[in-house]
Amino acid sequence: MYEQLNSLDTSALLALNGLFPTSTDTFWIAITKTVSWLPLYAVLLHRLHSSSNSVLFIKRLALVVVGVLFFDQGAEFFKYTLERPRPCHEVEGLRVLAHCSPFGFFSAHAANSFGLAFLFRKWLHSSWFPILLVVAILQSFSRIHLGVHYPSDLLAGALWGFLISFVLHKIEATWS
């Protein structure tokens, strides 16, 4: 069963890795960089600040910081506990466009981007959520295009981000 899932994961990776032409590589490299998204996250924090009082803003800002720590460091914990090699070390015929560290399960990019999307979902106008989902999907897909994650790494990262944001919303609900 594990071999079948791994084979399916590898086949999907190869199909998706070659989906876009090399002329789009610069775009995907920019998409994967956190610095590319800082203006968006600055706008989100501004919107959060303008839609809540100072105390609530500070509490929610603390939840964002805790969330990012758990999204990111949770991924690091699992990467070095499970030690699943990244596809760039294992898959023949894969285009690799980024530095390839040893382990990749699960994607911190996916955990962070989906986690923040679901965290901000309850705090901002509903029109923001589709935008944040598109950002999360783009950031996650960029990891496949760069050849550093399997699709299952991204799905697990997205699930981790969702679960952590769910827990953080439960914590916030106890403050009321």
Image (cartoon, rainbow, N blue to C red):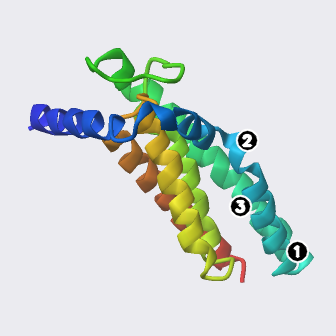
Q: CA distance from mark 1 to mark 3?
A: 13 Å
User: What is the three-letter code of the residue carrying label 2?
Assistant: Val
Density class for disc 2 (Cα within 10 Å; few <14, some 14-19, many ≥20) is few
Q: Which residue is mark 1?
A: 55
Q: CA distance from mark 2 to mark 1?
A: 28 Å
Q: Earlier in the sequence, mark 2 or mark 3?
A: 2
Q: Residue at x 43, y 28 (%)?
A: 148
- The residue lying toward the viewer, choosing from 23 and 39, is 23
Q: Quadrant of residue 73?
A: top right
Q: In the figure, 27 relative to 159: above or below?
A: above
Q: Secondary structure at mark 2?
A: helix
Q: Earlier in the sequence, mark 1 or mark 3?
A: 1
- Relative to 119, is 105 on the left or the right? left
Q: Earlier in the sequence, mark 2 or mark 1?
A: 2
Residue 106 x, y percent position in the rendering? 42, 38
Residue 63 x, y percent position in the rendering? 71, 61
Q: Residue at x 20, y 35 (%)?
A: 11
Q: Secondary structure at mark 1?
A: helix
Q: Which residue is mark 3?
A: 63
Q: In the figure, 146 relative to 42: above or below?
A: above
User: What is the three-letter code of the residue carrying label 3?
Assistant: Leu
Q: Which residue is mark 2?
A: 35
